[in-house]
């Protein structure tokens, strides 16, 4: 006979466990402690088994019967309900353990050999600051494009458009890792391609060719009273037109004064490829002055004046240029734009030579990127021509003509 709720409530504990039978294998197990549990007896593959449904009264008689009927349907489909329940519990535990932050840190650990220490630190810092507080504790498989976009929009709202896109790329790589390791069914970041805002175009401040004579004159006069090392750093950056971060961390073992070349390692380059900078006579002269001031043969080429154990800072270059009277008119990066314009329009140097020297990606007809030594003899000549031009305009000379 089917049970009633009154019978379930009134069932009293006895010295030994006992049960009330409802039907279809469902029974209410009453323990000597007074606790009551719904259980279902069934057979699967010829073996008698017990399926635990839940505790009464948290699971009512009506709900217990629904669970029994659902288990019976599973048995018809040759599914063991006890095993299915165990798998669900395991999956729930995995979902609880596999949060976005957990998987992201695992991905970072797996990939640390591929990146420089600085790159790895940047990745984790950005995630800890902008992503983990938003979605770090969520099960990675439950993160939808909408959830991820909401986290990225907060970064975008600060005007950090480039950072929001870098974070999207990093998140996409984390989701790809989760998909490959069968933690996550798909990559929601793929749906957000083209959704984030783009930084408004704002060209970096740079001098024009007509401004160079005055700039060189002010450097020579040093009315701004810059430290000698700062003056030399600005001159060297003008002559080599490398990125500021590439220059300020230069060390003496990278420079070969005999063959007149500076070999910048891949980890300091934006494109993560080693780069060769041919050195003009004028650049060699600057390096010789700096060498005479150096305290360590393997130390920084441009050490901080206040703390020689550290490299000169990016801000030192920028503030030096500002003190010369070029606030808002020139930056360290502006030397690259100036050189590119003059080399092309005034000195008529082949654009591919210039692009190679700027460390931009230049590809051959087969789509392969040229190596770091491509056109190196021509680039040596080009860098000397550029240095002669720079120092020529300081002395009132006008240098034009065709190169190569």
Image (cartoon, rainbow, N blue to C red):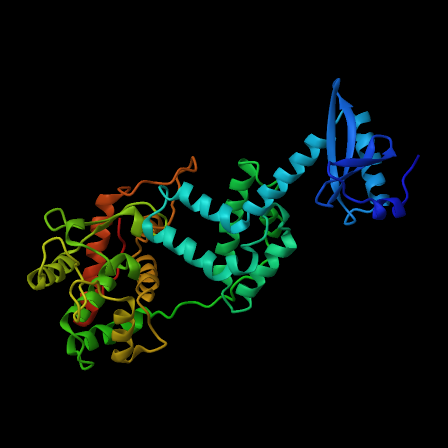
Identified at 51% across, 64% down, the residue is 199
Q: Is residue 126 left or right of residue 308?
A: right
Identified at 21% across, 44% down, the residue is 377
Q: Is residue 76 left or right of residue 154?
A: right
Percent x, y of residue 327: 33, 78
Number of marks in the rendered image: 0
For residue 282, say whether it is visible.
yes
Res 63 quadrant in image: top right
Q: Of all residues shown, which one is farthest toward the front?
A: 15
Percent x, y of residue 356: 32, 48
Q: Of all residues shown, which one is farthest toward the left?
A: 292
Res 21 quadrant in image: top right
Residue 201 or residue 245, whichever sits in front? 245
Residue 62 or residue 344, whichever sits in front? 62
Residue 182 or residue 76, whichever sits in front? 76
Percent x, y of residue 59: 78, 46
Q: Is residue 86 left or right of residue 55?
A: left
Q: Is residue 258 left or right of residue 386?
A: left
Q: Of all residues shown, which one is farthest toward the top?
A: 46
For residue 80, say whether it is visible.
no
Quarter of the picture holding the N terminus: top right
Residue 54 or residue 250, whichever sits in front? 54
Percent x, y of residue 48: 75, 23
Res 328 quadrant in image: bottom left
């Amino acid at each position: 006979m089917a049970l009633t709720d009154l019978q379930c409530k009134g069932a009293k504990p006895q010295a030994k466990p006992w049960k009330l039978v409802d039907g279809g294998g469902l029974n209410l197990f009453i323990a000597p402690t007074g606790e009551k549990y719904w259980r279902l007896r069934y057979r699967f593959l010829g073996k008698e088994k017990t399926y635990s449904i839940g505790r009464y009264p948290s699971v009512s008689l009506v709900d217990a019967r629904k669970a029994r009927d659902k288990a019976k349907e599973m048995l018809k489909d040759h599914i063991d309900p006890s095993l299915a329940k165990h798998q669900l519990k395991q999956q729930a535990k995995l979902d609880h353990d596999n949060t976005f932050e957990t998987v992201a840190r695992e991905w970072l650990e797996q990939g640390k050999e591929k990146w420089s220490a600085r790159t790895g630190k940047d990745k984790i810092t950005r995630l800890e600051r902008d992503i983990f507080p938003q979605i770090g504790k969520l099960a990675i498989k439950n993160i939808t494009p909408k959830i991820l976009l909401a986290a990225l929009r907060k970064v975008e709202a600060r005007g950090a458009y480039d950072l929001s896109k870098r974070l999207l790329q990093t998140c996409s790589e984390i989701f790809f890792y989760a998909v490959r390791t069968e933690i996550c069914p798909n990559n929601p970041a793929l749906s957000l391609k083209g959704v984030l805002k783009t930084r408004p175009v704002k060209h970096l401040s740079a001098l024009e060719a007509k401004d160079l004579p005055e700039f060189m004159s002010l450097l020579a006069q040093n009315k701004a009273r810059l430290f000698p090392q700062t003056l030399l750093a600005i001159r060297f950056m003008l002559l080599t037109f490398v990125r500021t971060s590439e220059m300020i961390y230069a060390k003496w073992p990278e420079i070969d004064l005999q063959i007149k070349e500076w070999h910048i390692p891949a980890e300091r380059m934006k494109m993560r490829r080693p780069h060769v900078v041919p050195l003009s006579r004028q650049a060699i002269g600057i390096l010789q002055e700096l060498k005479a001031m150096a305290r360590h043969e393997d130390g920084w080429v441009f050490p901080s004046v206040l703390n020689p154990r550290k490299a000169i800072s990016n801000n030192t270059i920028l503030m030096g240029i500002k003190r010369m009277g070029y606030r808002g008119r020139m930056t360290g990066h502006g030397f690259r734009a100036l050189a590119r314009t003059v080399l092309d329009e005034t000195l008529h140097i082949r654009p591919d030579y210039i692009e190679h020297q700027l460390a931009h990606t230049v590809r051959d007809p087969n789509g392969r990127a040229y190596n770091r030594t491509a056109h190196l003899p021509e680039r040596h000549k080009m860098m000397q021509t550029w240095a002669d031009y720079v120092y020529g305009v300081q002395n009132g000379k006008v240098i034009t003509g065709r190169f190569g």
